[in-house]
Amino acid sequence: MQYQSQTINYQSVHPGTDSTLISFYDSYEDLFKALMTPKTLMGVDGQPVGTEPLPRRVFVTDTNVAAIPAVDAFLSSIDRSQHTLVILESGEKFKDFTSVLTIVRAALEAGMQRGCCFTGIGGGVITDMTAFAASIFKRGAKLELIPTTVLAMVDASIGGKTGCDFEGYKNMTGTFYPARHLYMASPFIQTLPENEFRSGLAEAAKTGMLYAPKLFQIMKDQSNLVLSRDEATMMQIIMRCSLAKAHIVQQDLMETGLRMQLNLGHTYAHALESVAGLGTVTHGEAVAWGLGRQANLSLKLGLCDEKYVQDVLDLLSEYGWCTTAQHPALSGRPAEDAAAALIAAMRQDKKNDSGKIRHILQKELNCTVIQEVDDEAIRSTLV
């Protein structure tokens, strides 16, 4: 017999910061100067009341970013008695618990306290793992990020999602822990290999489809400027994406409703990445393919018309992304077998909470719905 019961009520867990400041720079010099300059403290009346002492930092980057001359010069200049540096191997295959614990171990060995600042300099893999490490180090250290890829600038670093891959599945572990400051520097874009550059553009296209018709039009009509990495055009894309995503995540940080829309194309994409082998296909390439597949799924479900699908496929084709039902990374498998493997991987997606698979779909550009879909409808878009 139950003797008695008692309820404990909790306040929401604090995500580590009340706000995120996003700053944009057009030179490495200004970026690193701002990073190492004490921040001004503001009073309740909006007036400066002093400066915040510089925190001890745990710098985290990867071998590719550390080889950029400006980054190498900056990291060589830091005071190692105050700050520590972790340089990880580059690539999705290193986005695992081993790397996250390497960051935590380095912080412990350097004698860092909870008031230190984990500072990730890199693409989405580095920003995700640095943020994850910060969120679990002594139950939450400070966090600042310097995204160095288009993908990280327009999407991965914004909004507080942290994590790493587990057992071959994308981002199966993680937390919500936003950075208090994001430093966006356009010179990094010029250092990117072509596949990494295009990878980020896919997330920008997704944002345009969801919330920013002007952005979608820029990518469609000014593809020559985009693909040539015109600095003014790229900065406009980054700022439009930042504004759009910031508007969503400040309304729904924990992805309980509205923020789910940001996964447009990602149910297909994450499945492709897992089935092909993490790191075989870039995240952006997978997202681009997923955008085309969701457009076809939306049509098959009677949500949209053929013009919408054609507009999406035309944009994807303009940037050389795959628009076929079977992605070339799976071309060695019979189409039916590849489809079955993809659907099985989709079932592992953390957004699902019933027997059907949840998809983010569209009726038209900037008109998005979330719907559970049966396997047969999904299969019809994959063969």
Image (cartoon, rainbow, N blue to C red):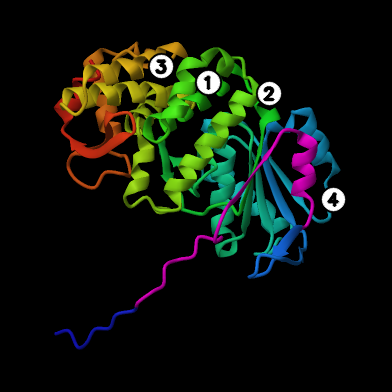
**Residue 196 in the image: x percent, y percent?**
56, 23
Look at the image and tell me whether residue 94 can be seen. Answer: no
Residue 33 lies in the magenta-colored region: yes
Task: Answer with left or right where residue 339 lies relative to residue 240.
Answer: left
Q: In what element is the residue under mark 3?
A: helix
Q: Which of the two discs, 1 and 4, labels the residue nearer the N terminus?
A: 4
Q: Which residues are magenta?
A: 9-38
Residue identifier under label 4: 79
Q: What residue is at 47 percent from the left and 53 percent from the top?
A: 176
Q: Which of the two discs, 3 and 1, labels the residue nearer the N terminus?
A: 1
Q: What residue is at 30 percent from the left and 39 percent from the top?
A: 348
Amino acid identity at mark 3 = Leu
Residue 209 vertical placement versus 53 (above, below): above
Q: Looking at the image, which is closer to me, 87 or 202? A: 202
Residue identifier under label 2: 191
Amino acid identity at mark 4 = Asp
Q: Is the residue under label 2 in contact with that under label 3 (CB below 8 Å)?
A: no
Residue 94 lies in the magenta-colored region: no
Quarter of the image with the N terminus in it: bottom left
Quarter assignment of residue 308: top left
Q: How many other residues sit within 10 Å of disc 4, few (<14), some (14-19) or many (≥20)?
A: few
Q: Nearer the viewer, mark 3 or mark 2?
A: 3
Distance (Cα) linking label 2 and label 4 = 26 Å
Residue identifier under label 3: 315
Amino acid identity at mark 1 = Arg
Q: Which of the two discs, 3 and 4, labels the residue nearer the N terminus?
A: 4
Distance (Cα) linking label 3 and label 1 = 13 Å
Q: In what element is the residue under mark 4?
A: loop
**Residue 257 in the image: x percent, y percent?**
31, 50
Residue 72 vertical placement versus 82 (above, below): above
Residue identifier under label 1: 198
